Image (cartoon, grey):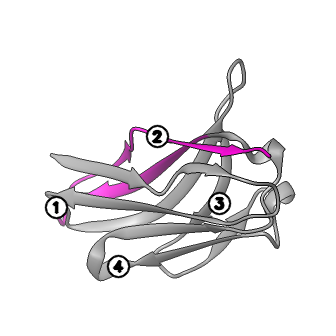
């Protein structure tokens, strides 16, 4: 079993910064892609940023240049540094990790429980 726990959300003023963390634990052989998504009420979950096991990154156009995704493999942790936050960044942010539990096992995607980010004055 794999557990994924996020932290770091909260209330911040426009222009401020937050850093989200997401740690995976349990029966992990390897982790491929780690990613952050966000969702607002009535809307589909959208991909914000992702990082591969080789360090390649992709970002949603609206966060490019403001958000930075990084990972610490020994800690099975992914981070999302969010700068110059805007009210439209307000959402529940979810972490996903693509995990292999054994050398010959298939890959499964695990999700965190979500953390609220609110950008408001």
Total labels: the figure holds 4
* Residue position marked by numbered label 1 in the rendering: 102
The mark lying in front, picked from 1 and 4, is 4
Q: Dividing the picture into quarters, in which one does residue 103 lie?
A: bottom left
Name which of mark 2 and mark 4 comes first in the sequence: 4
Left/right of residue 63 with respect to residue 116 in the rendered view: right
The reply to whether dot 2 and dot 1 touch (C-beta < 8 Å) is no
Q: Residue at x 82, y 63 (%)?
A: 15
Residue 94 on the magenta span: yes
Rate crowding at label 4 as few (under 14), some (14 to 19) or many (20 or more) other CA atoms within 10 Å: few
Name which of mark 1 and mark 3 comes first in the sequence: 3
Task: Give the spatial CA distance, label 2 vs label 1.
Answer: 27 Å
Task: Give the spatial CA distance, label 2 vs label 4.
Answer: 21 Å
* Residue position marked by numbered label 2 in the rendering: 114
* Residue position marked by numbered label 3 in the rendering: 49
The mark lying in front, picked from 2 and 1, is 2
Q: Residue at x 77, y 58 (%)?
A: 85
* Residue position marked by numbered label 4 in the rendering: 73
Provide the major secondary structure of the magenta segment. strand
Task: Give the spatial CA distance, label 4 vs label 3.
Answer: 17 Å
Task: Give the spatial CA distance, label 1 vs label 4.
Answer: 17 Å
SS at badge 4: helix
**Camera-side residue: 66 or 103?**
66
SS at badge 1: loop
Name which of mark 2 and mark 1 comes first in the sequence: 1
The mark lying in front, picked from 2 and 4, is 2
Pinpoint residue 79: horizontal percent, then vertical percent: 50, 68
Q: The magenta stretch spans which residues? A: 92-121
């Amino acid at each position: 079993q794999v557990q994924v726990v996020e932290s770091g959300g909260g209330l911040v003023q426009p222009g401020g910064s937050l850093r989200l963390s997401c740690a995976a634990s349990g029966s992990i052989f390897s982790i491929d892609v780690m990613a952050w998504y966000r969702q607002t009420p009535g809307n589909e979950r959208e991909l914000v940023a992702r990082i591969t096991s080789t360090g390649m990154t992709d970002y949603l156009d609206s966060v490019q240049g403001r958000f930075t995704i990084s990972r610490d493999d020994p800690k099975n942790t992914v981070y999302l540094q969010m700068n110059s936050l805007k009210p439209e960044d307000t959402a529940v942010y979810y972490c996903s990790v693509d995990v292999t539990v054994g050398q010959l096992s298939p890959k499964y995607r695990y999700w965190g429980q979500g953390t609220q980010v609110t950008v408001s004055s």
